[in-house]
Amino acid sequence: MNLLGLRKLCKTTKITLEN
């Protein structure tokens, strides 16, 4: 796994949780 992919996934998850 690459760090960029994990960061993107984390960001997407954060946005999904915020909604």
Image (cartoon, helix red, strand yellow):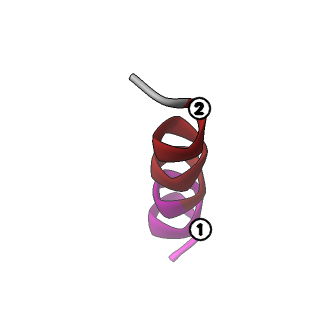
For label 2, count other residues whose C-alpha is less than 10 Å away and answer few (under 14), some (14-19) or many (20+).
few
Q: Which residue is mark 1?
A: 18
Furthest residue toward front? 2
In the picture, the quarter occupied by the N terminus is top left
Camera-nearest residue between 19 and 12: 12
Q: What's the CA distance linking mark 1 and mark 2?
A: 22 Å
The magenta stretch is: 12-19
**Residue 15 occupies quadrant:** bottom right
The percent coordinates of residue 6 (x first, y second) are 51, 37
The numbered mark at residue 3 is 2
Please tell me whether residue 2 is drawn above or below residue 14 in the rendered image. Answer: above
Q: Secondary structure at mark 2?
A: helix
Question: Which amino acid type is marked by label 2?
Answer: Leu
Question: Which amino acid type is marked by label 1?
Answer: Glu
For label 1, count other residues whose C-alpha is less than 10 Å away and answer few (under 14), some (14-19) or many (20+).
few
Q: Is residue 12 left or right of residue 1?
A: right
Tell me which residue sits at (60%, 44%) in the image. Answer: 7
Q: Secondary structure at mark 1?
A: helix
The numbered mark at residue 8 is none
